[in-house]
Image (tube, grey):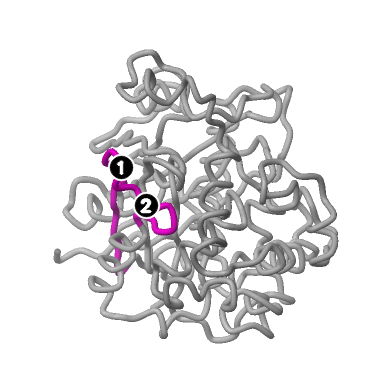
Amino acid sequence: MKRKAYIVGAFEHPVRKSPDKSTAQLHAEAVAGALADAGLHRSEIDGYCCAGDTPGLGVLNMADYLGLRLRFFDSTDVGGSAYLILAARAAEAVEAGLCDVAVVAMAGRPRSEAMAQTLGSNPAQPDLPWERPYRMVIPASYAMVARRHMHEFGTTAEQLAWIKVAASEHAQHNPHAMLPKPVTVDDVLASPSVADPLRRLDCCVVSDGAAAIVIAEQGIARRTGRPLVRIIGAGQAARGTHGDELDLVSSGAVRSGAEAFARAGVTPADIRYASIYDSFTITVLVQLEDLGFCAKGEGGRFVADGALISGSGRLAVNTDGGGLCNNHPANRGGMIKILEAVRQLRGEAHPAVQLPDLSLALAHGTGGSLGGRHGSATLIMERE
């Protein structure tokens, strides 16, 4: 493509519980925040992307609600990984000249609405008659992954707990984090069991919230005066159960990560900061392995002893506190992974967790469940 596209606006809504705002209102406020960050006006938006968290017919209802006249839109929905896929497609649309300014937005209110943590109840789902009788819920699905990883590789609960410890060390510097208090490995192990071997502190928060990014073509991007952050590699993968062929200890990140790295022309060794989807501690461990940061089965040793803590560890991960401590709006954390990567590349993360002279960052999202069918999406971003 002759044109280049840059992320010029990024905004994470500070709200974590919002009983007095509708989902559409949260969407609109996130869009307004991202536009303000970019120094652009709503009338300049001609591309809009959102996923299944939006009310009604998704992008059509939101475009009408916001008063947008669009040339490009997309409402791909694959859960928490959707927003990374949509960010890549929005950037491709800008580069192809299908639009000049695209917004990717999300919002949700699961905390206010007391949303159940199930794996779906739509009677049209083809898998439902075979899986629903076992009453699988999301924590149990991930617990199967954790138990299998422990069985095959000797991974321990203490090693998983280090992922939570790192998140909490970062969250103490985030004024909007739901759980800003640092915890220890012993604190994690002492928390109540949710689905063996996962405990309460192995699980992400449930939060209301909203977020948005603005992607603009090169001329507009330079006009904003914001740091130029560009997606240079993207990959996606759909992972099913395939009958009895499901490998519980691997994920779609094997394919999405390899594709993103190949397109970007870099390797995991080049990455100093990574935003890794963290619905549960085991989610992070499996994805670090599958993205190539360590060999399969080595994840437990890779994350132990503070290895993911910014400034002292081998790889800084989720310096905003992640879904484990900061925010997991609409039970879909993919957009928040993009935002913290952008902050790090801009040099706008909290000084206590900011990596100096950062030029590359990775963001990875998962939608669905690692213990069953899921989507994986990986972005590699660069600051010019």
Q: Which image quadrant for residue 240?
A: top left
> At x 45% / y 48%, what residue is drawn?
370
State the residue position of label 2: 376
Q: Residue furthest top?
A: 123
State the residue position of label 1: 244
> At x 63% / y 57%, what residue is drawn?
322
- Residue 136 in the image: x percent, y percent? 53, 30
Q: Which residues are magenta?
A: 232-252
Decide whether residue 81 is among the magenta residues.
no
> At x 48% / y 57%, what residue is drawn?
338
Decide whether residue 241 is among the magenta residues.
yes
Q: Nearer the viewer, residue 106 or 334?
A: 334
47 relative position to 62: left or right: left
Query: Magenta residues: mostly which secondary structure?
Result: loop
Q: Residue furthest front?
A: 151
Q: In the rendered structure, which amino acid carries the disc numbered 2? A: Ser
